[in-house]
Amino acid sequence: MNVTNNGYNDPNQLRFEEIRILGLQQEITALTVLHNNVALNPTHSISYKRTEKVAVITGLQLALGTSYTLRWVLSSSAAEKFDCHPESSATKESCEQRGCVWEVDTSPQDVPYCYYSSADNNYTVSELRYTSQGMEANVTLSTTTTTGGTQRSTTPIGTLRLQVIHHSDHLLQFKIDDYANKRYEVPVPLNLPSTPTSSIERRLYDVSVQTKPFGIQIRRRSTGTVIWDSQLPTFTFSDMFIQISTRLPSSYIYGFGETEHTQYHRDMNWHTWGMFSRDQPPGYKLNSYGVHPFYMGLEEDGNAHGVLLLNSNGMDVTFQPTPALTYRTIGGILDFYVVLGPTPEVVVQQYTELVGRPVMPPYWALGFQLCRYGYENDSEVAQLVEDMKAAQIPYDVQYTDIDYLERQLDFTLSPRFSGLPELINKIRAEGMRYIPILDPAISVNETNYLAYTRGVEKDVFIKWPNSEDIILGKVWPDFPNIEVNDSLDWDTSVEVSGGAIRGTKFIKDCSL
């Protein structure tokens, strides 16, 4: 703070008592005031408004017309360390090659040793345009010497396209993709308004785009709470590695299924969870069939919002106590949808309105159901039904697993279960339901197998692109094409109450 023209003597001895410093990414931990290079010791206090990135210094008592120098130190708390080397085997050398800082810190546990040295990322915004639906902009890689996650064997994308669309007063979309080349997007349409219906007067949110470094900030209009703030050093967009982080308004985050964890509230202490659909038990930090890159966030005042990333590539999310969240994915685009609630119940309503409501189950399906693998024959199943009734254990549905099939061939019946049709009729006559389990794969190695020959005749199998060759699998071959109308009639020619399709190989090992 330098005085360039001091021709005025203030008779009232006015003083600077408060200074506001704008645009600080981190909190000030120490302040030094110098006059003629001599440190002074004024009594002062410092507060930091994290959402506004503003530091307020009060109690300085700096004389008007006098030159001073203010020097400050920004915090480098563990919670502010964003991981620059998320893969394993990080070393000091590999970290510094990425332009990041290496610091061994075992307290708190799991804090990254390699973290970004600057609050800036490598992208800047140009050509920001306002449209009738929202905003558009080009986002440009500002240097070829990038830091962090882009130091991988994948090509950074130089120019990105940002679209912000106000779909409704409570629903916002922002999409970041390659400006020049088409990239994979989830081919499942969402239930979006045909034309945006929001108005600036009724909108529950405000959106701002930070230009240098690039970031997006979403603020709840009624309270001023920032629910999304991605102006962080982690932003990376390359061909096979995409990363974006956001600060969160609180640590109360729920979602990102289907995983096994001990509490609904996600642990924010440096935990990373992977997401990719696989046929495996959903053990600790492993997901099963469902992949739901959606979370609900509760704000400190009790308001709620939800965020969906529409991306089906393999990804993981890292929670840290800032509080902040980092997404990493190996392909596709960044296509985010934000719903503003404001209550948890309304967030769920808005989210299911967007992706589709759950199917209402039949009333009987809410009752007790019994199933296990390993029934020896239909007599064992029949005796089990009688034993359950004798014990006065009410239940509505009896299953059989693939034991009833002849050599596990779909739509066949093992001689050990020749009495199963009569048992099913008896169960149904008593008001119960029966459900068989099927593995949706048809063998091509049989000499006389109607399920395969009829499937070929009706052209229900998935084929390779631009070919008539049926796609085969190694374990249970030939996958019925679930998009062909005839497929439904073909695989439901059995009078049962329902069907449990297990081992959905055409879904579990790929991204839809």
Image (tube, grey):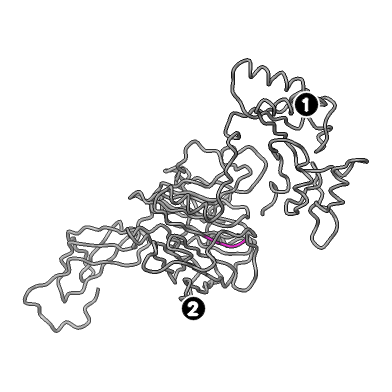
Q: The N terminus lies in which quarter of the figure?
A: bottom left
Find residue 386 and report its horizontal and vertical position in percent: 68, 18
| Mark identifier at residue 422 | 1
Q: Amino acid at mark 1?
A: Glu
Give yes or no for residue 137 being in the magenta stretch: no
**Residue situated furthest front in the rendering:** 429
Residues in magenta?
Answer: 332-336
Residue at x 59% of width, y 72% of height: 179
Q: The C terminus lies in which quarter of the figure?
A: bottom right
Q: Are marks 2 and 1 in contact (CB under 8 Å)?
A: no
Judge whether residue 474 can be spotted in this image. Answer: yes
> Disc 2 marks which residue?
127
Numbered disc total: 2
Find residue 9 and report its horizontal and vertical position in percent: 10, 80
Looking at the rendered structure, the secondary structure element under dot 2 is: strand
Answer with the quarter of the image where residue 185 lies.
Answer: bottom right
Judge whether residue 93 can be spotted in this image. Answer: no
Residue 504 shown left or right of residue 143 in the figure: right
